[in-house]
Image (cartoon, rainbow, N blue to C red):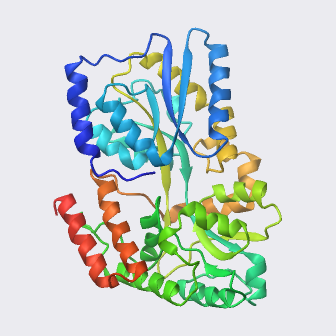
Amino acid sequence: MPRNAQLAARLTAASAAALFLGGLAAAQAGEVRVTIAEYSSATGPYFEEAAAAFEAANPDTDIQLEVVPWDVLLQKLTTDISGNANSDLAIIGTRWLVDFVEQNVVSELDSFMNDEFRGRFIPTFLSPSVMGGKTYGLPIAASARAMYYNKDLLDQAKIDRPPATWDDLAAAAKAISALGDDTFGYGLQGNEIETDVYFYYAMWAFGGSILNDDGSSGVASDAALQAATLYKSLIDDGLTQPGVTANTREDVQNLFKAGRVGMMITAPFLSSQIKTEAPDLNYGVAPIPSGGANGTYGVTDSIVMFDNSQVKDEAWAFLDFIFQDEWRSKFTRTEGFLPVNVAVSQEDFFQNDADLKVFSSVLADARFAPVIAGWEEVADTTVRALQKIYLGEAEPAEALSTAAAEANRILGK
């Protein structure tokens, strides 16, 4: 999910263009265009199957799908909106939603929803898309974060249980890294999607917050400094993989699947990947280590309806269809997410899966990205500061203080 500091400006231009053109959309009657975010190689085939099933039941409606990689999705959406060429429906990162809502480019969905439909959802996952008492999106995907650990590497390092604290993690990483040159104790992400979030795991554990009570940045707090200092010490002591700032989440996950990383923090979908790509890997899942407090990252992605759509009824019919339990279950199992439908969460598959039980158990400590205008730009300031710290180009206190000041400028604090 890419960063885009110019989102608000582009959406303002999009709104003006929509008014100038009288809100006309390019879609033909009965044709619903859907922009799909690509989660995996299975995403496209799943939606193609769902669209074919919907069309069979609704022969007067044609579903046109466009599958777009996450790293270019926001750029594409803002460009399409500016040209009044956007689709009718689109998957977005929920944290982008506040900007879309402020610029009046997405429709509220409450007028389409009845009690039965609303009751399908687990409130925790529906609520991030509710703003000002109105529902602007539906949770197409949901996730939390936990720590994966390689049981064989921990055994070889004579560690009898996954670390429960960050001090335990540092000690375990040291013992695992000592096993060999191709073995790294802790996989630390330093590039692209969720680089800032990887830092928040420790910051939350030490009692910090992304934003202070007054809405100002919390990344220069004592807890944030403690987290940054810890991560830098792990790098300097050779307890992480080399070249942290060049490693994306996927890079670190690949190292873990190859059996070269002892511990890393990521989402439930890694379990699905391991089952198909590394079935012999002996691994476990545990909560993120504590530092006196506990915190995990709660994530939802939403599917929205654009306000200039000329086929809202047909688009809603497709939404209603794909949020039926059968299709929700298939998508959630295929992609390795947490269920957003109540009935799906009660299926044996989700109730009995040991990995998913851990992710479900940490939801009480879940923190979500702030739903504020300009969040992507604010997050970017943290990422740039972290990369300087990891590379040794700035001291943690200096870099975090600079990031907080820049964030506060963006936030108007």
Q: Is residue 65 left or right of residue 73?
A: right
Q: Work out which quarter of the rendered image holds the C terminus and state it.
A: bottom left
Residue 408 drawn above or below residue 331? below
Q: Identify which residue, 48 or 159, lies in the foreground.
A: 48
Q: Residue at x 42, y 46 (%)?
A: 94
Q: Identify which residue, 182 or 346, lies in the foreground.
A: 182
Q: How many marks?
A: 0
Q: Is residue 72 visible?
A: yes
Q: Is residue 269 left or right of residue 202?
A: right
Residue 164: x and y in percent read 60, 81
Residue 308: x and y in percent read 33, 22
Residue 22 drawn above or below residue 370? above
Residue 391: x and y in percent read 42, 79
Q: Is residue 135 visible?
A: no
Among all residues in the image, which is located at the extreme right?
280
Residue 117: x and y in percent read 53, 30
Q: Locate residue 163: give its quadrant.
A: bottom right
Q: Residue at x 34, y 83 (%)?
A: 396
Q: Residue at x 38, y 79 (%)?
A: 389
Residue 385 drawn above or below residue 63? below
Q: Residue at x 66, y 75 (%)?
A: 261
Q: Is residue 265 left or right of residue 191?
A: right
